[in-house]
Image: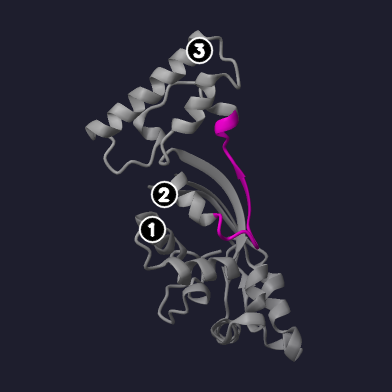
């Protein structure tokens, strides 16, 4: 399971204006913000942006200046792979160190495909029994029970991270992971395809234009 909330995409004008610096062709810039504050790519800018994105490397560096902020909620089995992409990403996460044990857990705290599976229920009951034991012991951080609780928590526990990244990083992720065996990566790539002007990332000419 993976969810995306509080999406913001910004710095379009600077990125696209700067894209034209090498040619000093600012007079051909035909993109703008509409009355609702949405970025609208003109045909001239979109054609040049696609050409540069397809060329890749330093030709496409304007993509680094299209910034994306979003909350991502996913299990640790996905986050440990996301952490491969350290360059161009910043994230603030919820914390097991600070919050695990503050309440009993429910199936909604995990990314299990079937929260009613008997094994899932058994695992959650086990975790909650350790939380209760830790409470009975006086909630001593660093105690053997607390340490065991930290170590035994299932990989699928959900973390929320507020992530800042850019279109170049998303392009790398998309093409690295679009055929991945982990469903969360396929869902991530499907989400990328919904972003404004996602064709700059996916390189699919027929991608729908969006609002940004």
> What whole-number distance in Å separates the C-alpha atoms at marks 1 and 2?
7 Å
Question: Main SS type for the magenta part?
Answer: loop
Confirm whether residue 186 shows in the render.
yes
Confirm whether residue 102 shows in the render.
no
Q: Of the residues tagged 1 and 3, which is closer to the observer?
A: 3
Q: How far across and how far down the image is residue 84, in percent?
A: 55, 59
Q: Of the residues tagged 3 and 2, which is closer to the observer?
A: 3
Q: Earlier in the sequence, mark 3 or mark 2?
A: 2
The foreground one among 13 and 195 is 195
- Which residue corresponds to mark 3? 135
The foreground one among 80 and 56 is 80
Give residue 187's mark.
1
Q: Residue sitting at 40 percent across and 25 percent down? A: 127
Disc 1 is placed on an element classified as helix
Furthest residue in direction front, as rendered: 144
Instruction: Determine whether 182 is above or below 169 in the image.
Output: above
> What whole-number distance in Å separates the C-alpha atoms at marks 1 and 3?
38 Å
Q: Dots 3 and 2: beta carbons under 8 Å?
A: no
Q: Residue sitting at 48 percent across and 76 percent down? A: 199
- Which residue corresponds to mark 2? 2
Quadrant position of the C terminus in the picture: bottom right
- Residue 125 appears left or right of 84: left
Q: Dots 1 and 2: beta carbons under 8 Å?
A: yes
Give residue 66's mark.
none
Instruction: Determine whether 90 is above or below 18 in the image.
Output: above
Dot 1 alpha-carbon crowd within 10 angstroms: few under 14, some 14 to 19, many 20 or more? some
Which span of residues is magenta-colored? 83-97
The image quarter in which residue 126 lies: top left
């Amino acid at each position: 399971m993976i969810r995306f909330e509080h999406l913001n995409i910004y710095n379009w004008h600077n990125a696209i204006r700067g894209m034209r610096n090498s040619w000093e062709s600012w007079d051909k810039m035909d993109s703008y913000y509409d009355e609702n504050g949405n970025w609208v790519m003109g045909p001239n800018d979109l054609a040049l942006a696609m050409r540069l994105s397809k060329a890749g490397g330093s030709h496409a560096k304007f993509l680094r200046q299209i910034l994306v902020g979003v909350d991502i909620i996913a299990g640790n089995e996905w986050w440990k792979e996301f952490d491969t992409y350290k360059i161009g990403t910043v994230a603030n996460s919820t914390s097991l160190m600070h919050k695990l044990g503050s309440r009993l857990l429910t199936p909604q705290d995990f990314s299990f495909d079937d929260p009613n599976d008997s094994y899932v229920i058994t695992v959650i009951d086990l975790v909650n029994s350790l939380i209760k034991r830790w409470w009975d012991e006086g909630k001593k951080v660093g105690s053997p029970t607390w340490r065991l609780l930290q170590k035994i928590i299932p990989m699928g526990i959900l973390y929320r991270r507020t992530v800042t990244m850019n279109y170049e990083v998303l392009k790398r992720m998309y093409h690295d992971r679009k055929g991945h065996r982990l469903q969360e990566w396929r869902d991530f790539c499907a989400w990328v395809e919904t972003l404004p002007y996602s064709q700059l990332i996916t390189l699919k000419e027929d991608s729908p234009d969006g609002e940004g």
